[in-house]
Amino acid sequence: LGLPLVVVDVGAHLSDSCIWALGRFGTDTVRCLSMEALPELLRLGRRSLAANNFTPAAAVVGAAGGEVRVDCLFDPGACSHRAGRELAGARALLGPAGRVDVLKVHTNGNEVEVLRGAAALLRADKIRALVVCISETTDTVSGATRGGLEELEATLRDLAGDAFRVVPVGDHQALAVARSSILDPGW
């Protein structure tokens, strides 16, 4: 792995994943970006990172207009002008690596949309590991279920072929590790 370790947390809530990573591994080792769509959580996440003195190594950005495009981090042309402006500082923070070591996604049912927004990075083998909270929901009218482990696996296959190995972790989380990554334990 190259340093710094690049962590992107989509649906960051209070930026707790960034705070954990920075507290555990230090600001010299980790660069972390929290993406949050809810304005109050966005504000509190920024306050929390500042209170822990992590702001030199972390940033919190809003998902502009609900647009959560992880691709925008490394390709400004991949997203709207507004989202591109929002992410400009994050690009500088993450540096020129053009990769995400860990992408954590917890968006209460929009996980597949976030992965689709990271399609170019997934196809280019620029994401090494995913931690996805699986939010399975059932449509009350049609009875159709979406957001489960099977949909996660199918989406990753569609976007990245067999590049990821998906492993359930508990009832509502899955870990997906790039087979090309040294992180792949070979399960």
Image (cartoon, grey):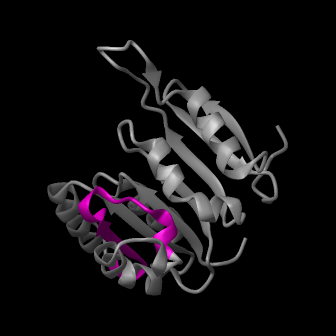
Please tell me in which quadrant of the rendered image residue 155 appears. Answer: top right
Residue 25 rendering spot, x and y as whole percentages? 54, 67
Is residue 69 positioned above or below 88 on the image?
above
Q: Residue at x 62, y 72 (%)?
A: 99
Q: Depth check: give the residue in front, 164 or 54.
A: 164
Q: In which quadrant will I find the N terminus? A: bottom right
Residue 90 rendering spot, x and y as whole percentages? 41, 79
Please tell me in which quadrant of the rendered image residue 42 appears. Answer: bottom left
Is residue 38 positioned above or below 27 on the image?
above
Q: Residue at x 34, y 60 (%)?
A: 67
Q: In which quadrant will I find the C terminus? A: top right
Region in magenta: 54-73
Magenta region includes residue 102: no
Q: Is residue 13 left or right of residue 22?
A: left
Q: Residue at x 45, y 87 (%)?
A: 92
Is residue 113 positioned above or below 64 on the image?
above
Magenta region includes residue 57: yes
Q: Is residue 166 left or right of residue 89?
A: right
Q: Is residue 133 left or right of residue 169?
A: left
Please tell me in which quadrant of the rendered image residue 36 appears. Answer: bottom left
Q: Is residue 27 something one can see in this rendering?
A: no
Residue 104 rendering spot, x and y as whole percentages? 50, 52
Is residue 178 positioned above or below 70 on the image?
above
Q: Residue at x 76, y 47 (%)?
A: 161
Residue 23 rendering spot, x and y as whole percentages? 44, 65
